[in-house]
Amino acid sequence: MATREDRSKAPLVAADGTPLKEALRRSQAIERRRAFALVAPLLFFLLIVFIVPIIAMMWRSIYNPEIREYLPQTASALSAWDGEGIPPEPVFQAMAADMIVGVENRTIGRAAARINREIPGARSTMMRTSRQVDEWSAPYREKFLEEDEDWANLEFWTILQRESRLITPTYYLLAMDYEYNAQGEIAPRPEVYQIYRDLFFRTAWMSLLITGICVMLAYPISYMLATQPARISNLLLILVLLPFWTSLLVRTSAWIVLLQQQGVINELLVGLGAIDSDGRLRMIYNRTGTIVAMTHILLPFMVLPLYSVMKTIPPSYLRAAKSLGAHPFRAWWRVYFPLTIPGLAAGCILVFILAIGYYITPALVGGDSGIFISNLIADNMQGSSAQLKLAAALATILLVAVLFIYWLFNRLVGVEKLKFG
Amino acid sequence: MAVPTYATTAERVWHYAFRIICGLIFFFLIAPIVVIIPLSFNAEPYFTFTREMLSFNPEGYSLRWYENLLGSQEWMQSIANSFFIAISSTIIATALGTVAALGLNRPNMPARALITAILISPMIVPLIITAAALFSFFARVGLSNTYFGIILSHVVLGTPFVVLTVTASLAGFNQTLIRASQSLGANQARTFFKVILPLLLPGVISGALFAFVTSLDEVVIVNFMAGPTQTPMTVRMFSGLREEISPTILALASLLVALSILLLATLEMIRRRNERMRGMSPG
């Protein structure tokens, strides 16, 4: 029989004889696996149907395979070219070989179209030469140059060399209103095409403005909701929750009905004699329309987190401050307001993130001056492959901005504070 | 919150001014939604109140826009499409989301923060970006212009709500109830179905309602993804509002407001039942 001392030295064991540490580790591993097994279906679903498509979109915004794919030999021959003077014979030889393959596979037209996007007119030169190239023999350089003077154009080769890179910043430059100029340098685009940077700033500025208006409107009513007796505040809460649960399109159409030139508000003002029938206010299909409708749509997202924080603040704090001699405003500013900051931060970031990515409401009531960057992403999505890549670049920039704000939110407040309903 | 008798004049003025300000803000919130309901009964194709309507002349009112809506093959088909898509995606999203939330809230869950972030991410990523990503992805795998593709994308949008609401109801869950049930002799399955699930159900239902509304109300993705046969009502409504806006849309909008009142009432009922079950006084 073991003495007491022996037992204290021997490792503790579970019922089946395994050391306790080992048994615990094993059972925890099983628990971990069980927990993960529950999460796994959704996690894999989202990875495949959400995360992978987003990464693919980001990849598409920098991926530039056409020249590499359609003119592979030229692309590799050009990588050795120093950019000084007309390229040497091997480049022309590679071009001739690529053209013969391209004519056979009927891909030469696609290559020509791709180059034509960079140099208008290059398409016809490419196509014309490609029809004759199979009759030529080395050396090719002179024959190309005789055939068309475009082949002596340095710009053509510079662009071809640049575009044979598999990864290109072209679409990000476009999204920032820059482009490559004839010398291959990065330069601002002509002013008429400069729309994206402005629109990014406008989207951010209008989202901030809408967030600000939401704060000013949400603060008083959240305070009222939090301080009224339950019977009244439940009733008032319905006035916030009903819009919250009402379809976005319904609310946008309501604002169209109200703000139109022949709409309720203008008719009312004319009826009251406040304005002339000719002087009807333009409140929609412009920036005003977007701001009013989006403030209405996003206001509940500000009220709900504010209200849930304010409900936890005992009213006696304010009374205490006042009884100690603080002016009501000072009491509010020094005692009440700091306590509401978590709710305020949650609401602000929620509203701002939602606003910055808005598409539907600006598209319907924004006109030209009230659209957001999302609207241009949507426009570009319906276009050619180059526009798709531009859309992907714009979307990636927006995504990075939103993720940054979200990360900031997470550091400051924490996602788990978000509550719905 | 009556004005105390010792309040100064300034305090009294502020008290009433504050109430008026709040009243105006509540009016701003609710008036646009209320105003479309009478306008949907307008006998004329206008978006404002006619003289007849204001004088409550019965001739000023009619059901013609409702007849237009309910008698239109196209509208009814797209409403049916919307409900089919919403119900299918809600069922999948609720199942996936509830199971995931149960796993996420287990004490031994590995990499909880990272996985939570991934599960919630469809809610943070702007819809237009999700649409752009799914649009070309689904085109490549042959899912564009299919119900299946639309349903999958709506499942993506709906699951974060289910995960969040179920997590919230698990957070308020009294763990001693499980021990109590087990000490009274119930096995794991019985404990789950008789104790855990009934208490969890409100969270599951409100998550499902959120997923349902999200899908029913979604325009951006379906606008790119839906072919002519799958057109849901939102896309029809969106193009209607863009091109020539007809009061038929107001009739549909009024019906949707009625639906949201119904949803709100359901949620309120769930909330009260939930508070009773947890032994709190109904607030």
Image: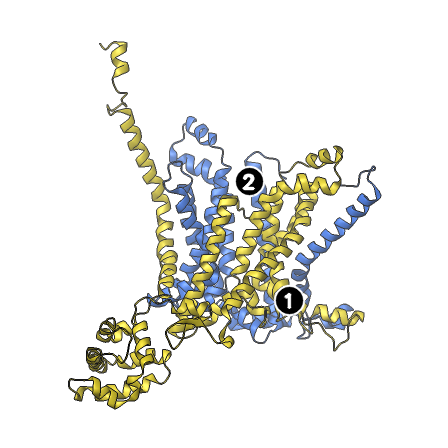
Question: Camera-side residue: A79 or B276?
Answer: A79
Q: Is residue A220 above or below residue B198?
A: below
Location of mark 1 (residue): A288
- The chain letter under disc 2 is B
Say whether marks 1 and 2 touch (CB < 8 Å): no
Residue at (57, 53) in percent of width and height: B263
Q: Residues within 10 Å of mark 2 (few under 14, many from 20)?
A: many
Residue B180 in view (yes/no)? yes
Q: What colouring method underlies this structural image?
A: by chain
Q: Is A387 or B148 nearer to us in this picture?
A: A387
Foreground tag (1 vs 2): 1
Residue B49 visible (yes or no): no
- Tell me the amino acid under the disc marked 2: Asn
The chain ID associated with circle 1 is: A
The quadrant of the image that shows the N terminus of chain A is: top left
- Dot 1: element: helix
User: Which mark, by number, is residue A6?
Assistant: none
Tell me what hue chain B is rendered in. blue
> On screen, A383 above or below B7?
below
Residue B274 is labelled as: 2
Q: Measured from the top left, where is residue A16 in percent x and y?
A: 24, 24
Q: Amino acid at mark 1?
A: Thr
Q: Quarter-wise, where is residue B153 in the image?
A: bottom left
Rendered colour, chain A: yellow
* Residue A167 percent coordinates (x, y): 32, 66
Q: Secondary structure at mark 2?
A: helix
- Callout 1 crowding tier (Cα within 10 Å): few <14, some 14–19, many ≥20: some
Q: Residue A139's image quarter? A: bottom left
Q: CA distance from mark 1 to mark 2?
A: 43 Å
